[in-house]
Amino acid sequence: MPLRPFGRTGVKVSALALGTMMFGSRGNPDHDDSIRIIHRALDAGINLVDTADVYSQGESEEIVGKALLGRRDDVFLATKFHGQIGDDPNHFGNSRRWIIRAVEDSLRRLRTDHIDLYQVHRPEEDTDFDETLGALSDLVHHGKIRYIGTSTFPPSAIVEGQWIAEKRGRERVVAEQPPYSLLARGVEREVLPVAARYGLAVIPWSPLAGGWLTGKFRKGASQPPSSRLTRQPGRFEIDAPENAAKLEAVSALAELAAQSGLSLIELALGFVLAHPAVTAPIIGPRTLSQLEDQLGAASVVLSPDVLAEIDKIVPPGVTLSDRDRGYQPLKGGGTALGGAALGGRA
């Protein structure tokens, strides 16, 4: 597994990151099976594991904590806060009050004394970002967390965070986690260039577009089974009019992958890995076989000719569906920002 620099921190992380959103009641409820998947990923050389407190309401963090017993020092561990936890109206968001509570809960579930990368899961207009960075800076100084990251932030908020850190003496945000895939290229316009300008690590989520780029969605085929279909039917219905452009693109991309001697998964992950601003795309397998299908992509290098053909199918900076822009709010708060307006492989 190739290693890449994590921004300008001096840390080296694997070219693929393991996302754990699908572990727990949201996806794979079998803890032992989920732990086997995590261990296989670690054995394959993945050392960046990403989770969040809101994934299955803390269950994902608990599974990760059990999986890392005896292996914690070998892992760069990332989690996130912001989403609603339980019913208390104050158990969400980016306030100092909630951050201090949320980090202790995550540390307990993860069975660790520190978190390597603690990420703000979404921006929140009602909370001064200086309040958020102040609380996170205190956690760095207390040894609870090592680095600060953000997820799905627009470029203006990324720049604001850097300005606050410089002008007000806060710890700096060192990483951004944006949505990025062959079907959602909006962040190429501004988010990725801004991240590169400030030396941020970039760990994109949903590089397989929620399953659209796994090869199971094909033009003229019947509706494939999907664990996400019941939660987001409009986004994953193969016959939905708003998904027609995605379906056309997926068919063309699958043909290009076959011509290149690659699986569609390898093409999709290789594309994200090829962007010079990207550190490590986050893969989110629910089963061991899904993990195995994705591990080989870490060594895929796409030729300029293949990248040029991709640009003909999905032009740089274009996101094919409003549903995939990635800037919808998490339950309990956040902002709905248009991702397609934010972000091209230059």
Image: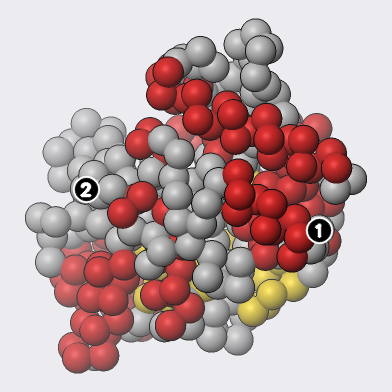
**Mark 2 falls on what kind of element?**
loop
Local crowd at mark 2 within 10 Å, few (<14), some, or many (≥20)? some
Measuring from the top left, give residue 295's x and y in whole percent.
79, 49
Q: Is residue 72 visible?
A: no
Measuring from the top left, give residue 86's x and y in whole percent.
28, 33
Residue sitting at the far right: 261
- Residue at left offset 36%, top offset 50%: 340
Closer to the camera in the image, 312 or 187: 312
Q: Is residue 173 visible?
A: yes
Report the amino acid beneath label 1: Val
Number of disc labels: 2
Residue sitting at the far front: 312
Residues at marks 1 and 2, CA–CA distance in whole angstroms:
35 Å
Measuring from the top left, give residue 231's x and y in whole percent.
43, 20
Measuring from the top left, give residue 225's x and y in whole percent.
63, 14
Residue 139's quadrant in the figure? bottom left
Local crowd at mark 1 within 10 Å, few (<14), some, or many (≥20)? some
In the displayed structure, 293 sits above or below 304; it is: above
| Left or right of 345, for residue 46 | right
In the displayed structure, 52 sits above or below 87; it is: below
- Residue at left offset 28%, top offset 48%: 338
Residue 217's quadrant in the figure? top right
Residue behind mark 1: 300
Q: Earlier in the sequence, mark 1 or mark 2?
A: 1
**Mark 1 falls on what kind of element?**
loop
On residue 335, the disc is 2
